[in-house]
Image (cartoon, grey):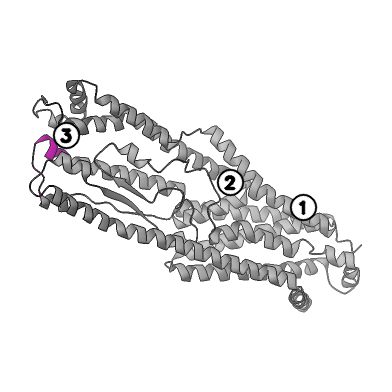
């Protein structure tokens, strides 16, 4: 053990003398701090935006009270009144933004057809990226492996090339202790940086100190250990420093860039999903056709869904609001199957990626951190279902006014339903990711130790 710590201290002195490595660690520390700053700033911007929405709704109500100073037709109110379905972030979202700046975090709603409003800003597939944004999770998943490569590519090869390894192994020390001390020092440097950034990020984002703290640290630690295991495997091949550097960078490109790209393409081919804009186009076509259909046909279709309103008066006017909102509703129903297939297709893509992400620890770590922060795709789909239920509640609130011809008064604004939705962590996904990372770490370290045993270290 004394020799181990002697070698460990030697590595510390060597590290301090290597100004380039010290500078690289400092740059990564600054990069991580910027990732924390970016994530917390983005979440603060979204929170501030969300806090303005109630004020916008209040102003809209005040304008409508001026526009309709007395009792009004509820159809006019439903057409002009805007309200919001809002998706509040969890505090952890600042550390792993996931898809919060890809998918809308609020939906502006009126009593009109839902799908056009729900997907108005959804012009891209919400599953189009897996990597996320420049936040702390991005730094841990994509940049920390590069630091590990820079620290470990010449783990033994530099001593061999300089002729030092022969002298070192001539001492009463086993090759395993030499490799262990070198790996332990580098692991201490990397994990020290990862834990420091994680603690700073947690304090900066003011996350609740619950079980997710240990899960986050566990995911970060196992992910770094995996890359040290890869470095151990390459070191066990006993090749030159140049070969080791190229091989490690090749593994990084394979697992961080190539495999995720191929996996994304394969999942997209296995579960093709149309753009959300296609739903809105089809819904608009259905609604526009409603103007030309006989009113009796439209209302009979609507009454089949809502028989409680069948006893309302026959429509003889050229235009009435209850007929207008009836074919708006029917427009939603016309694309209901496509909307369900769209959401199910996205969920199936996500589920397939979860099954295959063992092929890329980078995807596994990123999706696990997103799940821990409540910024993954399933959380967004839950928000969309919540917004849909809220729109249904708005219809249920307005329909008695429309079909019973009850006037809408100023006091009725306060009775209108409101909406709120807050992200919840997908803890089961994060824990599964933790288990997969543990398996990956075990595999690479077992492979490295087997190679070292099969090929004893050659000092030349």
Task: State the SS at label 2.
Answer: helix
Q: Residues within 10 Å of mark 1 (few under 14, many from 20)?
A: some
Mark 3, residue position: 321
Q: Are marks 1 and 3 in contact (CB under 8 Å)?
A: no
Find the residue positioned furthest to the front.
67
Residue 247 badge: 1
Q: CA distance from mark 1 to mark 3?
A: 69 Å
Magenta region, residue range: 397-409
Q: CA distance from mark 2 to mark 1?
A: 22 Å
Mark 2, residue position: 357
* Label whose residue precedes the other's in the sequence (2 or 1): 1
Task: State the SS at label 3.
Answer: helix
Quarter residue 422 falls in: bottom left
Q: Nearer the viewer, mark 2 or mark 1?
A: 1
Residue 87 falls left or right of residue 271 = left
The answer to whether residue 352 is visible is: yes
Q: Residues within 10 Å of mark 3 (few under 14, many from 20)?
A: some
Q: In this orientation, which residue lies closer to the viewer: 398 or 159? A: 398
Q: Position of residue 307 (x, y in %)?
A: 16, 29
Q: Residue at x 58, y 43 (%)?
A: 356
Q: Position of residue 258 (x, y in %)?
A: 66, 45
* Label whose residue precedes the other's in the sequence (1 or 3): 1
Q: Residue at x 39, y 33 (%)?
A: 279
């Amino acid at each position: 053990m004394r020799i181990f710590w002697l070698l460990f201290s030697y590595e510390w002195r060597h590290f301090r003398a290597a100004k380039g490595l010290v500078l690289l660690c400092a740059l990564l520390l600054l990069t991580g701090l910027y990732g924390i700053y970016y994530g917390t700033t983005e979440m603060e911007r979204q929170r501030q935006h969300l806090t303005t929405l109630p004020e916008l709704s209040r102003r809209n109500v005040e304008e409508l009270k001026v526009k309709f100073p007395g009792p009004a037709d509820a159809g006019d109110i439903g057409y002009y009144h805007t309200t919001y379905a809002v998706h509040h972030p969890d505090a952890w979202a600042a550390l792993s933004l996931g898809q919060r700046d890809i998918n809308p975090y609020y939906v502006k709603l009126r009593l009109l057809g839902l799908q056009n409003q729900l997907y108005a800003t959804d012009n891209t597939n919400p599953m189009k990226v897996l990597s996320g944004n420049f936040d702390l999770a991005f730094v841990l998943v994509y940049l920390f492996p590069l630091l590990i490569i820079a620290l470990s590519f010449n783990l033994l090869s530099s001593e061999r090339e300089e002729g030092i390894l022969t002298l070192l192994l001539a001492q009463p020390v086993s090759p395993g202790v030499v490799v262990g001390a070198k790996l332990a020092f580098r692991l201490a440097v990397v994990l020290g940086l990862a834990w420091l950034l994680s603690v700073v990020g947690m304090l900066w984002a003011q996350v609740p100190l619950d079980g997710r703290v240990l899960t986050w640290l566990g995911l970060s630690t196992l992910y770094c250990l995996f890359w040290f295991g890869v470095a151990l495997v390459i070191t066990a091949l006993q090749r030159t420093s140049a070969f080791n550097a190229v091989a490690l960078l090749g593994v990084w490109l394979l697992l961080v860039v190539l495999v995720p790209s191929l996996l994304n393409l394969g999942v997209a081919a296995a579960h093709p999903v149309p753009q959300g804009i296609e739903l809105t186009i089809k819904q608009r076509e259905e609604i526009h056709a409603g103007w030309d259909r006989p009113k009796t046909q439209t209302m009979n279709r609507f009454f089949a869904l809502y028989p409680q309103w069948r006893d309302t008066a026959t429509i003889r006017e050229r235009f009435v609001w209850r007929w207008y909102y009836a074919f708006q509703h029917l427009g939603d129903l016309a694309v209901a199957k496509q909307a369900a297939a769209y959401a199910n297709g996205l969920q199936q893509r996500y589920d397939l990626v979860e099954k295959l992400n063992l092929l890329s620890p980078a995807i596994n770590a990123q999706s696990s951190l997103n799940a821990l922060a409540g910024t993954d795709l399933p959380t967004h789909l839950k928000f969309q279902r919540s917004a849909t239920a809220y729109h249904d509640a708005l219809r249920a609130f307005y329909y008695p006014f429309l079909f019973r011809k009850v006037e809408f008064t100023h006091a009725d604004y306060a009775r209108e339903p409101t909406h709120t939705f807050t992200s919840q962590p997908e803890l089961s996904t994060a824990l599964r990711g933790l288990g997969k990372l543990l398996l990956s770490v075990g595999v690479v370290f077992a492979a490295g130790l087997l190679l070292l045993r099969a090929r004893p270290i050659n000092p030349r």
